[in-house]
Image (cartoon, helix red, strand yellow):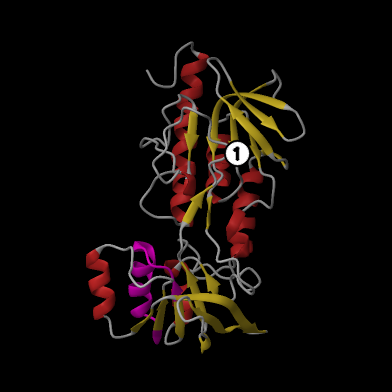
Amino acid sequence: MSENGIYDLIIVGGGPGGLTAGVYAMRAALKTVLIEKGLPGGQINLTESVENYPGFEEISGFDLSQKFLQHAKSYGLEMIQQEVAAVEPGLEFHSVRLGDGRHLHTHAVILATGGSPRKLQVPGESEYYGRGVSYCATCDGFFFRGKDVIVVGGGDTALEEALYLAKIAGRVYLAHRRDAFRASRILQQRVLAEGKIEILWNTVVTEVKANDKGVTAVALRDTRAGASMEIAVDGVFIFIGFSPNNQLVPAGIKMDHDGYVEADEKCETNIPGIFVIGDLRQKYAKQIVLAAADGCTAAMAAAICVEMKKAGGDCKP
């Protein structure tokens, strides 16, 4: 812990956003600790290849996360590998309670807990994530140029991603468990007019099949007739929803109806001194570069917040 027992800043979450926040916090000379229960880098550790992070034409997700980590460590960032049980706002200091029972006190908190795509929970899905199974067409679509893929879902995101993939892939199957889409009318019109998209109504994926090179096919079931079939594909793109990891968001912080935290341009919530970044924050898109940008913004804003609090003021004058 810091010398006087109080941190300037506690960062909860060690993904790209959290680690970037750590870099900027240390550069601002803040007494900072980053708490991450798992492997630093977060979900990008599971991504086979990243081709859209500036400065790297191609790099594995694990290697990129290691570069984030090494950069943060080069400034002497303190890190604790431990689960966070709760974040408790206070008038003078905020508290972070760890799973081992410790309480850490701080002037400011950055929540960087991210989010998780909803899973189909079928055999082969988790086993072949990053090797043909994806939850981001913008991230991984390039690898399937001229190949056959299947998109699963019926909302706006699923149709948008199917249209995006239609520009790249050879053929795009679009499987939806019902007989009508939930997506906006304009997106439905575009999908129905796209000759490279074949819609599979009343259809669910029951298994992802693969070999040592990656995905080869999916098993499907007709939800009405019960009939089963199999189609050969090289990629499976799943868009059945995304859930923010908001379990640690303190009561009283504003969230939208989907559970994303509402924050201002400084990434600060309606509770002074508590910031939210990355996929947990309500925002337009979910990308590594945007999480990193949030980390920079929040850490710089936190530095000003801490300075104001130490001078006897408040983060929000």
Quarter holding the N terminus is: top right
| Viewer-side residue, 156 vs 316 | 156
Splitting the image into 4 quarters, where does residue 82 fall?
Answer: top right
Location of residue 132 with respect to 94 vertically, above or below: below
Which residue is tagged 1? Answer: 12
- The answer to whether one can see residue 169 in this image is no
- Asked if residue 138 is among those painted magenta in the image, a careful observer would answer no
Q: Quick check: 189 left or right of 316?
A: left
Q: Residue at x 55, y 63 (%)?
A: 119
Residue beneath the point at 58% across and 37% down = 248
Q: Position of residue 157 (x, y in %)?
A: 37, 63
Q: Is residue 121 left or right of residue 182?
A: right
Magenta segment range?
151-171
Q: Is residue 191 above or below residue 242?
A: below
- Amino acid carrying mark 1 in the image: Val
Residue positioned most to the front: 225
Q: Nearer the viewer, residue 69 or 119?
A: 119
Residue at the location (38% across, 76% down)?
165
Q: Residue at x 43, y 31 (%)?
A: 269
Q: Is residue 180 above or below residue 116?
A: below
- Residue 272 % position (x, y): 45, 24
- Rendered location of residue 134, percent (x, y): 52, 70
As helix, strand or loop, the secondary structure at mark 1 comes to: strand
Q: Position of residue 311 (x, y in %)?
A: 49, 12
Q: Is residue 131 above or below residue 160?
A: below
Q: Is residue 157 magenta?
A: yes
Using the image as rendered, state which of residue 103 and residue 193 is in the foreground. 193
